[in-house]
Image: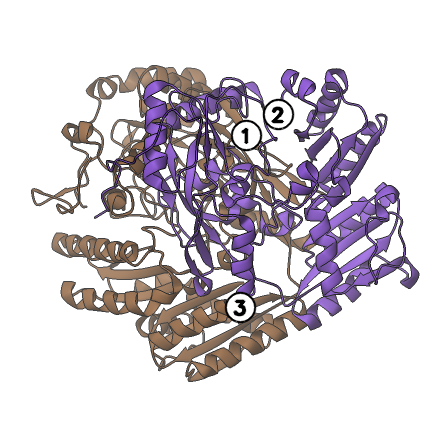
Amino acid sequence: MSSLQMPKVDDVVMSKKDKIASDLCGIINSKNVLSNPDELRPFETDGLTAYRQMPLLVVMPETVEEVSQILEYCNENKIKVVPRGAGTGLSGGSMPLEDCVLMAMGKFNKIIEIDYENRCVVTQPCVTNLAITHAVQDKGFYYAPDPSSQIACSIGGNVAENSGGVHSLKYGATTNNLLGIEVVLMDGTIAKFGGKAMDAEGYDFLGLMTGSEGLLGVITKVTVKILKSPEVVKAALVGFPSIEDAGNCVAEIIAEGCIPAGMEIMDKALTKATNDYSKAGYPTDAEAMMIVEFDGTEHEVEAYINKAKQIAEKNNSTSLKISKSNEERLKFWAGRKAAFPACGVLAPDYMCMDGSIPRGKLAEVLNEISRLSKKYNLAVANAFHAGDGNLHPLIMFDANDKESLRKCEEFGADILKYCVKVGGALTGEHGVGIEKRELMCEAFNDKDIQQQLTIKVALDPNSLLNPGKVYPILRKCAEEGRVHVHGGKTKFPDIPRF
Amino acid sequence: MFMEEKQNSQTSLDFNQNIFKPSSREEIIEIVKNCYKKNIPLEINGLKSKNKIGRNFQSEKTLDLSDYKGIIDYKPEELYIKVKAGTPLKEIIEELDKNNQQLAFEPNDFGYLFSGESNIGSIGGVVSCNFAGSRRFKVGSVRDHILGFQGINGKGETIKSGGTVVKNVTGYDLSKLISGSFGTLTVLTELSIKVLPKPETSKTLVIKNPHLKKALDFLGKALSSSTDPSGGVFYPDYFGKNFVLNDLTHDGGLTAIRIEGPINSVDQRLNRLSKELSLLDQELSILDSEQSNIFWSRTKNLEVFKSLKSNLLRIVLPISETLQVIQKLKSFDIKYFIDWGGSLIWASFDQLNTKILSEIKDTVKKNQGYITLIKVEEDLKASVDIFTIDPIKYKISEKIKRSFDPKRILNPGKMYTGI
C-alpha cells in the first residue's frame, strides 16, 4: 500500500470509540452499528484498491431522519464522516479515515416511485444504476448514463461522482439526467434540490452537489429522468492501421454532425487482451479499433452508419463490420465492457486513469503515453470514450512491488498533467478523490481552489464530511501533513502547494 | 504551472463616474476591488434585454459589460466556443451559422416582450438567467451547455471552473452554480459553451386542436414515444392567428410537435407519430423546414406576448400537474401558451395583485412547481417575491452568496432580500 497521508487523526475521537458506538446505537438500531474489525474489514477500500484504511466505526442508517441525526451528532462531537454507496468508485472517494464514522448507505436500496407520466424515477441512493433501467424497461424506457460498473454501482454514488459512461456522448453524464435530490448536510439539515419540475429557481444546488464527491452532503433520495428506448441500435466495429487514423476518424464523425450514441477506441494491446478474454471477434491485427454506435429510428441509424462508414474508409480503415442483430451488437460491446477484467491477464495489477482531452489531440496524447510507457518501463493498454475525449489508459503494475506502484503513480500523474497541458481535464468521470488530489493545482490556481474551499466551509465549517479528498493541501494545513509521502519524499515536489 | 494573474496592472479608471463600461478584465477587477473596499453595491448589466427580470435593488454604481465582448476561440470540430461574457448572442449565432452549428438550448429572446423588438441580449445575461427554449426536455437547459467559465468574485478575484472539454469532473461544478444566479455570485468574464451541429432538417407536425386536455395528451404521448421530438407546444384558440404560415391551414388553437434529424428519418418519424396519435389527415398540417423554423423562433421569442403591458408569469410544473393548474388559473382572466412538451406555462394575467398572486403561488406550489414573475407592474414588484424559495434553500443560498461575495456588492437583492 502506498503511504498517502490523510487528515490528522483525532486522538480524542479515537479514545472515545466505545462511547461513540454506544451513542450511535441510541440513534439507530444497534445491529446497524459495526465496530469489530471483522465487520469493518469489507469497508476498508473502494474501487481504488491500492489504498486501504479501516474506519473507526461503520453505521448503516435506514431512514433520512437517521442520517440527519447521525450527522448532527458527529458535527457536534467533531467526528469525521465518510459516506459510501456501493464502494465501486475508482478514485478513492469513499476510502475511510482511521478516525471516521463510515456511513454506508446500503440499506437505502429501494425504488420509491416510477412515474411514467413525468418520465422519471424516484429512488433511494443505493439502488444500482442498472436496476433503474431494469425497473422501467418492460415499458420501453431506460436510464441513459451507463458507467461500466453499472451492474454494481449505486445511483447515489453516480450523483456524487457525476458518473458518465459510453453513452454520455449523446445523452450526457449524471448531471444532465438528474431532476432532483434530497441531501443531508453535515449539520443535519435535510434539503431538497430540484424535483419533478425542471430547472428549479435560485442557485443550482443540484448541479453543485452533483460531482461533489461526498464533501458537501449525503444523498438520501434521487429523482432521475428516464428516456424511451430507441427503436433501432446498430454498432460498427472498425479497424485502423494507426491510432492517428482512428483519432482523425472520430474527430471527423463528430465534426460532420453525426453524434453517435457511443464511440470508443481501444489500442492494439487492449483489443487483443479483450478479444482473448471475451471472444468478441475484434480485428486483432489492427493498431486501433473503434466501436461506433448509433441509435434512433431505422432511417436515422441507416443514414448515420453510412456516413460513419464513408468517413472511416476515407481515414484508411482496414476492416469494418456492422452489427446485423442485437446479439452481435452486444458482442461488440462485451469486449469493451470487459476491458478492465481482461487486463488482469496482462499484469498482477493495473491502475485505470481518467483524463479528458480535446478530441483533436487524441493521437498526440497517445504518442506521449507510449513514450512515457517506455520511460517508466510499465506496459499500458488504452481504452477511450473517444467521442468525448475521455481517456482510460490502464497502467500495468505489481502492487506487491512498492517501486512498481510508485512508478505507476508517477506515470499516471504525467499522463494527467499532459491532458491538462493540451487543454483537457484531470478527470472526465472517475472523480478526483484521493487519487488525483495532489494534481488539482495543475488545473486550478490558488484563487480557484480557495473559492471552492470557501463553498465547502460554508456548508461544513469544521471540514468533517469526507475530508482529505479532492482538494490539495492548504498552506495553513501543511502542518497537518496531508501530503502523499513516499520514501521520505513528497509526492509531486514540483507542484506548488497551498 | 498556472499563469500568474495580471491583477496588479493599474488602469486609468475614473471612480467618480456612476456607470463603468470596462473593455478589459483588468478594469473589471479594479472596479470590483474598489467597490469591495468601499462597500459599494454594483448593478451588473450586459445588453439589458432581461434586466427588468428580478427584484429592484439599491445600487450606487452600474457595471455595463456591453463593451467587454468578442469571440476568444471557436473550434467547430471540438464543438465549443469561448467568448467574453458581454458578447451579443446575435454575434455568436451568426458565427455558428457559418459552420452550420447552433446553441442547442434555444435561448428566449425577451426583447419582443420588453421593448417590442428583438434583443436576445448578451451571452453573460443568457447564462445568468438560465431560461432555456423549447428543446429543454431533450437537450437540457442553458446550464447543461456551459463547459467552463471565468468570473470575478465579490472580492475582485479572478476565479474559474470547468474548461473546454465536455467531460470534466475536476472539483465542484461551479458552472452550474453561476447559471441562473442573476449576477449575484460573480461578474462573468469568459464563457466556454458547447455548440452542436444543426439538424439536417426540422419539420413540425401541427395538430388542429383547441382543447387543453387533448393537447396535453398528444404532447405526453409524443414525448414518451421513440419518435424523439425536440419541441412540443400548445397555443389556445386566441393565439392561433399569430401563426399565419403557408403550410398551416387553420388559425385556431394548435398543438405543435417538432421532429429533427436526417431528412428520411424525419419523414418516417412524422408519419409514425401521426399514426401513434391516431390523427386524421384533415386534423394536421406539416410545416417544412423553413416554416418550422419560423414557428419555433416565434415561440422562443414569446412573440404572442409582444409589447404586453404587464403581468407575465413563467410557471414550471411536472407535466402531470399542468392540466389541474391551468384549470384553476382560468378563474382569473388569463392568456397562456404551453412549452417544453407540457411543463412550462407562459401566462399573462389581465389583473394581478398580491392576493391573486399569493393564490396562484399556493396552487403552483401544491402541484410541485414554481413561478417566476417575468414582467409585473413596479408597484406590485416592490411588494412581492419575484422568485420562489423555501427557507432551507434560502439559508444555504445566503451562505453560498457570502462565499463568493462576502460584502454583498454584486447585484445585491436582485434575487432575494438579503442575498
Identify residue type, mark 1.
Gly
Q: Distance between the residues labelled 1 and 2?
A: 8 Å
Identify residue type, mark 3.
Glu
Q: In the structure shown, which secondary structural element does the residue marked by tag 3 occupy?
A: strand
Q: In this view, does A54 lie above or below B15?
A: below
| Visual hue assigned to chain A | brown
N-terminal of the two: label 1 or label 3? 1
Q: Distance between the residues labelled 3 and 2?
A: 42 Å
Dot 1 alpha-carbon crowd within 10 angstroms: few under 14, some 14 to 19, many 20 or more: many
Asked whether disc 3 touches disc 2, contact meaning CB atoms under 8 Å apart, the reply is no
Q: Mark 1 points at which residue?
A: A202
The dot on residue A293 is 3
The quarter of the image holding the C terminus of chain A is top left
Asked whether disc 1 touches disc 2, contact meaning CB atoms under 8 Å apart, the reply is yes
Image spot of residue B397 (x, y percent): 48, 24
Q: Which chain carries label 1?
A: A
Judging depth in this view, the residue of B387 and A158 nearest the camera is B387
The dot on residue B388 is 2
Residue A417 at least partly seen: yes
Report the chain shown in purple.
B
Which circle, 1 or 3, is nearer the viewer?
Answer: 1
Q: Mark 2 lies on which chain?
A: B
Image spot of residue A480 (x, y percent): 17, 28
Residue A42 at least partly seen: no
